[in-house]
Amino acid sequence: MSEISNVVPADTPVATPMTTLMANAIRALAMDAVQAANSGHPGAPMGMADIAVALWSRHLSHNPANPHWFNRDRFVLSNGHGSMLQYALLHLTGYDLPISELKNFRKLHSKTAGHPEVDVTPGVETTTGPLGQGLANAVGMALAEKLLAAEFNRPGHDIVDHHTYVFMGDGCLMEGISHEACALAGAWKLNKLVAIYDDNGISIDGQVAPWYIDDVAARFIAYGWNVVDKVDGHDIEVVDAAIEEALKSETRPTLIICKTVIGKGSPNRGGTSKAHGEALGAEEIALTRKALGWDHAPFEVPADIYAAWNAKEAGAMAEGEWTAEFNAYEAAHPDLAKEFHRRMIGELPTNFAEIAADAVAAAHDKAETVASRKASQIALEAFTAALPEMLGGSADLTGSNLTNTKSTPSLRFGDQGQVMTTEGRIGRHINYGVREFGMAAIMNGIALHGGYIPYGGTFLTFSDYSRNAIRMAALMKRRVVHVFTHDSIGLGEDGPTHQSVEHAASLRLIPGLDVWRPADTTETTVAWTMALVQKHRPSALLLSRQNLPYLPKVDADVITQGAYILAEPSEVGINKKAQVVLMATGSEVHLALQAQEALAKLKIAARVVSVPSTNVFDRQSESYKVQVLPRNVPRIAIEAGVTDFWWKYRVDAVIGLDRFGESAPAPDLFRFFDITADNIVAVARKVVGK
C-alpha cells in the first residue's frame, strides 16, 4: 500500500519573478477572454495557473509545430470548463492559436470553443466538458501507451515512452466515472499516468464541504495509486517537486493533490463560487490587474513573457531526438517500424478487403443458425487474428457478450507492472469489471491515443450507463465499437430490467453513430466490416441472445448499404409488383419472411427489406432509397422495440411495443406482444385493403 508523500520542502525557493509573470499571463488572458465573451469560467484557469507553469514549462514534452508528433506527452484538461487555461497555454507556447482566436473565445466557428474540442484546436487531445470523462480518457491513453510499448519496444529502442497528464477538479472526482476509471488505472499499474487535482473546495453551488467530504488521498491509495498530498498549488517549485516525484513511480499511477484558491488574484471573487462560471466584470478585472501587478492592456502579453513560454525550440529538439531514435529502430527492425507506422495512422492492413470478403463468404457458405452475439464472435475470430490492433473487452459479461477470441488472451499485469504475455502474445481482451461507463470512456481514450481499435461489450440495456461516452465518441469522430448483446425482449426470463425496448431507437438518434442490428451471420460479419473501415465514426452492434435462422440471400454486398431487398414476391411464387413492403431488423426479419410466404397464399405480393442499419441507409443516394422503398407502396416496419422511430420512413404501420417487457421465455413474449408472422399478415391485409 502506498503512503502519502508531503512535498513541502523547507527550503523551497520563492518563485522567480518570471515564473510569476508566466502564471499571471494565463490569469490575464483567461479573465480577458471570458469578459469579452461575457461567458465562461475564469476561476479554474486563474487558480491552476501556477500548476500549469510547473508542468508545461518544466516537464511536458510536446512540439507546438507538430501537435500530432507521436511520442509527445498527452495532456488532458478533464475540468474542461476551464478551457481558457488550455487555450492560453497553447497560445503562449507557440501553437497555431493566435491571439485573435482567444479574443473570439466562445464565438461561432472559432478555435476556442466553450470546452476544448479535439480536431478543432491544435494541441487539444480530447474533447472535455462532461466531468470525469477526460480523466477516464487519460486512463485509456495511458493504457494504450503501456501496451504499445510492450508490443513494439525492443532492447535499446524505446520508441514508445511518454506520459499522460490530466488536470481535474472536484466535479471530476464527484462523478462516479472517476471511481470506475481510476480503480482500473490502479489495477493496470499505469505508472506513466499523472493526475493533478485542483483541490479548491469550490463548485457552482459554493463550498463543497457540506456535500463532498471524501478523503481523496485515502480513496486513491485504496485504488493502488501513489499519492502526493498537501501540495501548495501556488508554489511552482513545490508543484515541480511533486511532479518529479510522480515521474519516479515504477508501478503505480500518481495523484498530486494541489490546494489552490479558485480565481487566484481576484480581490473580491477569489475563493468564491462567483469566480467559477461567470465573467469577473470590468471593475473586478481592474482590481485584479492591480493586485497582480499586471499593467498591460487586455490580451496584451509582453515579449519577454512570450519568450519564456515559447516551447517551439524545445519541442523541435525533443521530436528530432525521437525521430533519430525511430530511424535507428527502423533500420534494426524494419517490419516492426512499418507496422507501427500503419497502426499509428489508423490504416487497416492492405489485404483487409480480402480478409473481410473471406469472412463474409464463410458466413454465407456455412449458413449457421446461431444467435447474432455468437455470429459476432465468429466474425471476431477472423478479424482479431488478422488485425493485431483490435483491443477488446467486456464489462464482466464476457461469456454473454462473446467478445473474446483465440487471438485475444486476457490482459494481465505482473507485480512490477509489466504487461504479461500468453504464448508470447500480450493480452488483448480486457476484463473491465462492472464498469460500463468507465469502459466506454476508456475506449475513447484508447482510440484518441492511436495504435488500437477498441471494442467492448455489455448488455444493450446498460448502454444507458455508457451513453454520454458513446455520444462523445461520435462527437469526436473516433473509431470505437460497442458490442451490445441481449438486444430485445428476445433475451427472455431476465425481464423488463434487462429487455431493451427503447435503446435501439435512442442510439440511432446520436449523430455520427452507426447502429447495426443484424439478422444473421452474414449481416453480422458485414456490420463488423463496416465498423472497422469507418475510421472516423463509432459503431454500435445490437446482437441477439436467442438463435436466429440464416436468411438466404443472393448478394451480400448490398448489406453495406444499410438496408436492402432481401426477398421479392417472385421468390415465394407471386409474379407481380409488391403491394406492401415489410421492413424489419434483427431477430424480426425472419418473421417478415414467414409473413411474406403466408401473404403469398392470399395472393398478396410482399417485398421483404432487411434494415440492419438505418444510419447507413439514410446516407445512401435518393435513387437507392427509392429502389429499396418504392414510392406509393405501403410500408410496414417490424422491430421488437418502441415504434415512434419508424414513422420517419412514412410507414403505414409499425409492429413493435411501446411499453416495457415481461419476465418469460422469449417465444412466449413475442406471442404476448403480438410480434408474430400472423400479426404481420393481419396488419398487411389491413394496409392493402384485403
Image (tube, rainbow, N blue to C red):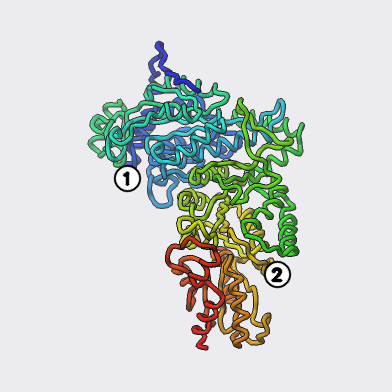
Coordinates of residue 507 in the picture (x, y in percent): 49, 58
**Neighbour tally class for label 1: few under 14, some 14-19, many 20 plus, Cα within 10 Å:** some
Q: Which residue is mark 1?
A: 39
Q: Is residue 199 left or right of residue 373?
A: left
* Three-letter code, disc 2: Asp
Coordinates of residue 328 in the picture (x, y in percent): 73, 30
Residue sitting nearer the eye, 660 or 215: 660
Residue sitting nearer the eye, 346 or 613: 613
In which quadrant of the rendered view does residue 416 lie? top right
Coordinates of residue 429 in the picture (x, y in percent): 63, 42
Look at the numbered disc 2 and give the secondary structure of its residue: loop
* Three-letter code, disc 1: Ser
In which quadrant of the rendered view does residue 50 lie? top left
CA separation in Å, label 2 and label 1: 55 Å
Mark 1 or mark 2, which is nearer the start of the sequence? 1
Q: Residue at x 32, y 45 (%)?
A: 39
Look at the numbered disc 1 and give the secondary structure of its residue: loop
